[in-house]
Image: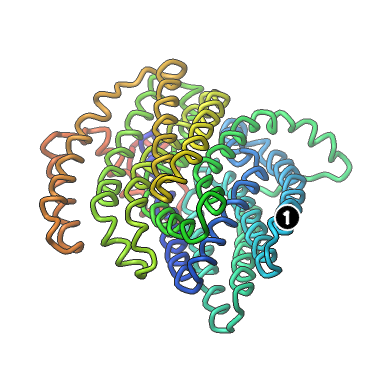
Amino acid sequence: MTWIGRIARNASFTLTAQVVSRLLRMFYLILLARQLSAADFGFYNFGFSLALILTSLSNLGLETMIVREVVRCQERASSYLGSALLFKALLSLPIVGVLALLGIWLDYSAPRQVALLLIGLGLVLRELVELLMGIIRAHQRMEWEIALTAAEGVLLLASFALAVLARAGFTGLFVAYALTYVGQALLALALVSWRFVRPAISRVALWRQMRDDLALLRASAPVGVANFAGVLNNNGATLLMPFIRDEVETGIYGAAFSLVKGFLLLPRSLGIAALPVFSRLYLSSRESLRAAFERAFKVAWVGILPVSIATWALAAPIIRLLYDARYESAAAPLRFLGLSFTAMLLNTLCANLLIAADEQRIASVARTISIALNLVLLLVLTPLRGAVGAALALLISHTLLLALVIYAIQTRVCACRWGEILVKPTLAGIACLLALYALDRWSLWLAAPAAAAVYVAALVALRVIGASEWALIVAAWRSMGRWRRRAPASPPDVGP
């Protein structure tokens, strides 16, 4: 299968998994926001951000490096997975302990201390699932991601419904959250052991195995730092806002932040899908690597533009549709968050190219610079503008990060033709935005499809999608029919 077919197949399954996961999580957050008061929902957003930042250290970039290294040497997959699970266990235990101490130090009530600990436990287990998914992605069997993410969503909503029906109260909602990820982690471990590889952990040669695989840990450390910086960058506002403003303002920002994460899926899916392909092409053909990255970035840019534009133009009706009157002020930060996530998710694709090219240290440095700027801007803008200031800080920092990683790619990996990638899709996006504002007096259900039609017509008129991009899209569409079949190692055509 050519690189177009592999990226298309990987992306189609990964995108489906991301859509399933994000939509179910978004639905869960909307239900949770309706069940809790604005202050309690603000606590949830703060606690989730705090736990997410700390638990991001428990993987230390291992899931990304497992993809790259298993693609290059599948014979060591069992040893890599065993060592990664050991490293994760050693890193996770103190993190859960730190969360328990932080709940006491912040002088939370007993129910909130328990809730914070349960959120942390759930996120540690979710990171374990991501680690196991690294094996699935390395084998380019992303269809199994759909099963695991669907299981997550079903378990999350079912446990939430049971907690509400049983009137388990505030603490019961978070017990249900933690139990969801206990179930998903057990399913993921069983799936990986059954279909792919069993983790090799020898009690006799345990320390020798860990010593031999320390190279994996050293290589993953910059990726772990970059991931930690990214998580801190994205969640810094919800972490600091309770201290700078109040929990209600945190809840307003969290409502907008949670919503945007559910919409912008395509670039992240392409980033996950492209890493194993980029890793192979880096060793075999730099010209093919450049071509693969250009096509993937262009398709991502084309896919994300209308979502960002719709988020900007239709923020107020979207908030009114999905939340109640308490969250009307979330429309303003939602507009800027939509733009910031455009840059963030394109950064994911660029970072995966840098990792595939053994330039993960550059990605780590770039993310560190970005988070430093974001924290400074948060301290300046949030006291002045609240949730809107926090959203602006995130937009500026991610835009800087995108500029840095593009410069690194251009100078260290491959010289891309950015004019061909960006100009025509941007013009089509401007046409879509103008159509939305022209149709502003229409309802949301009429204006959005009409603007989407204008965008597609502009793409066709400007000939944005060339032969390679059509091949990528057609291969993605056709590959969805391969749900139960393993792709052959080297079939003659791009399609299945």
Secondary element at image label 1: helix
Density class for disc 1 (Cα within 10 Å; few <14, some 14-19, many ≥20) is few
Res. 10 visible in picture: no
Residue at image mark 1: 105
Residue at figure coordinates x 43%, y 59% from the top left: 252
User: In the image shown, does 247 or 294 lie closer to the viewer?
Assistant: 247
Looking at this view, name the residue that lies furthest to the front.
384
Q: Amino acid at mark 1?
A: Trp
Q: Position of residue 382 (x, y in %)?
A: 46, 45
User: In the image shown, does 37 or 307 lie closer to the viewer?
Assistant: 37
Tell me the quarter of the picture where residue 329 sits: bottom left
Q: As displayed, is residue 293 above or below residue 159?
A: above
> Left or right: where does residue 246 sit relative to residue 346?
right
Q: Position of residue 262 (x, y in %)?
A: 40, 55
Q: Where is the C terminus found, in terms of image quarters?
A: top left
> Left or right: where does residue 347 sit relative to residue 362?
left
User: In the image shown, does 317 or 488 lie closer to the viewer?
Assistant: 317
Residue at figure coordinates x 51%, y 27% from the top left: 366
> Left or right: where does residue 123 sit relative to residue 320?
right
Q: Position of residue 337 (x, y in %)?
A: 38, 47
Q: As displayed, is residue 172 above or below residue 115?
A: below
Q: Position of residue 7 (x, y in %)?
A: 40, 39
Residue at figure coordinates x 56%, y 55% from the top left: 46
Q: As displayed, is residue 166 above or below residue 344?
A: below
Looking at this view, name the residue that lies furthest to the bottom.
166
Residue at figure coordinates x 43%, y 43% from the top left: 268
Looking at this view, name the residue that lies furthest to the top.
411
Tell me the quarter of the picture where residue 321 sits: bottom left
Q: Where is the N terminus found, in terms of image quarters?
A: top left
User: In the image shown, does 200 or 233 lie closer to the viewer?
Assistant: 233
Res. 304 visible in picture: yes
